[in-house]
Image (cartoon, rainbow, N blue to C red):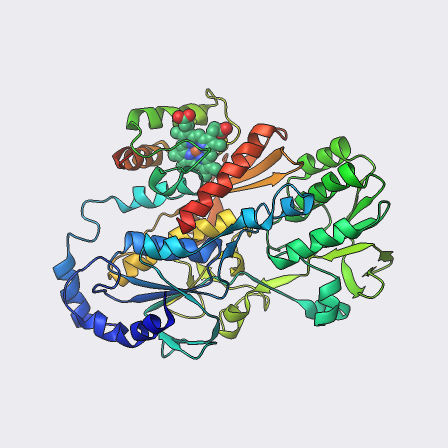
Amino acid sequence: MASAKYLLGLLALCAGTAHAGENLNSRNWAASCSACHGTNGHAVTGMAALAGVDKAYLVNTMLEFKSGKRPATLMHQIAKGYSDEQIGQIAEFFAKQKK
Amino acid sequence: MERREFIKLVSAGAALAALPGCATTSGGRTIGRVVVVGGGYAGAAAAKYVRMWGPDIEVVLVERNAEFISCPLSNRVLAGVMSIQDLTRGYDQLGSKHGVKVVQDEVLAVDADKRTLKLAQGDTLSYDRLIVAPGINFMYEAIPGLNSAEAQQKVLHAWKAGPETVALRKQLEAMPDGGVYALTIPKAPYRCPPGPYERACQVAFYFKQHKPKSKVLILDANEDIVSKKGLFTKAWKDLYPGIVEYRNNSELVDVDAKTLTAKLQFDDVKADVLNVVPPQKAGKIAESAGLITANNRWCGVDFLSFESLAHKNIHVLGDSILAAPAMPKSGHMSNQHAKVCAAAVVALMHGEQVNADPMIANTCYSFVSDKEAVHVSSIHKYDTEKKTMVTVQGSGGLSSASSDIEGQYAEAWAHNIWADMLG
């Protein structure tokens, strides 16, 4: 591995390129959905794709799962595991992905 | 990857790292190398996600098998509703789409001080960070009569999907109608808590169609059904009356492989097909690398990064870890470990803070017939005070009943999680 000093230099060089402006928490939390809904929301079959879906729709649907208003086999149990704030950030992440 | 190319890569690694710049493609300039050992649900996902989130990091995945075979859904091979090919996937897209260098080899030893791995085919591979995801190893020493290759050929575990799954299906096919299939379950924790009970359903489904006078006898070392109790007992009663018999507190102490006899503490049970799921511990390489920290069986980790409690720069994922309470050893869990770890590894390689607030979602589907499935789900968050993962209050739960629609979701789950780790 490069020496620490070298690495610092490299970091300075790379600053802004690695994950510029990306909210890492929302990226990481959204990855907890992607085992079922596909990497970055690109489902391959049989589950709803979330990539590029309108943020308001995603938030609203999740809140309806959470309150029990929307019938589900399991999403009501999953939605209850996330705060409204987390749901907002996850929805924003998926909404920003290309379809 | 070609072998020759790999050797070049091993020796060129240091030179590559010394080049300036921030190239983001494979074969380009990198800030260091992450090696992943084991290409299962945890390791393959970790390799892909480190590359995806850290495109300036070189990732080498060392896996001894040529192809991935899924354990989840493999009980359906026993029912005859799926083939082992249906559960098999290649590793090629990890390379072509994500720039992971996949090496088919076996790791013999880890030198944590020098940060090198010794491979069976002779190469030495250096790493900046190591991710170890070797799955489980069976503790045959606990079952003396099963502690030989010969006995293990007659009494199968089929708890790692592959040739044993196919061989167990053949034993069931060869069994005469009216025979007894006995399945022994070790004390928890073991890989896939609902798996044995699902297996009982799948074998019973086969018997009901083709050998209706036969029996499925479950010999469970645990005090009670470990997972989805109500859903499984309902399936046995409604779908397979007179076929499935469940016995709790029936720990296997030995086996007579010649007579297919399961020896319990106060009882001997003779079977026509004897299927022993042995007690388990962390995978072999985790043990030899000194990563086991609990009960001589499991590897303790820091749940913010999945870094080993025994060695810096080494992370452990999947079934090998000492899980936090209510975290099952499952394929879905392994996928989630991989993502928390990948985010942490990318941050650490860049000299950044590790994410302090990881979330993990788990779901285990089980088929109770050819089409109907049930699930258990749970959501886990990091508790800063307890320094471990805890389930989020009020979240998670079980299916209200088994259904065809959940059977379809279970299949969709498999295709999506395979694509999430390999595609």
Asked if residue A5 is positioned above or below residue B416 in the image, the reply reads: below
Would residue B66 be found to the left or right of residue B278 on screen?
A: left
User: Which residue is situated farthest in the top direction here?
Assistant: A69
Query: Which of B322 and B289 lies nearest the eye of the viewer?
Result: B289
Query: Which of B280 and B26 lies nearest the eye of the viewer?
Result: B26
Locate residue B154, reporting x and y percent: 75, 63
Please report the residue visible at 51 percent of the width from the left and 31 percent of the height from the top: A74
Please report the residue visible at 57 percent of the width from the left and 51 percent of the height from the top: B71
Please report the residue visible at 50 percent of the width from the left and 55 percent of the height from the top: B68
Q: Is residue B187 among the parts visible in the rendering?
A: no
Locate residue A5, reporting x and y percent: 17, 71
Asked if residue B265 is positioned above or below residue B17 in the image, the reply reads: above
Query: Which of B345 and B17 lies nearest the eye of the viewer?
Result: B17
Q: Is residue B307 among the parts visible in the rendering?
A: yes
Q: Quadrant of residue B309?
A: bottom left
Would residue B392 be found to the left or right of residue B20 on screen?
A: right
Locate residue B170, reporting x and y percent: 72, 53
Q: In which quarter of the image is residue B366?
A: top right
Locate residue B260, reporting x and y percent: 82, 60
Q: Quadrant of residue B148?
A: bottom right
Considering the image in quadrants, where does the N terminus of chain B appear?
Answer: bottom left
Number of numbered discs on residues: 0
Would residue B395 be found to the left or right of residue B137 on screen?
A: left
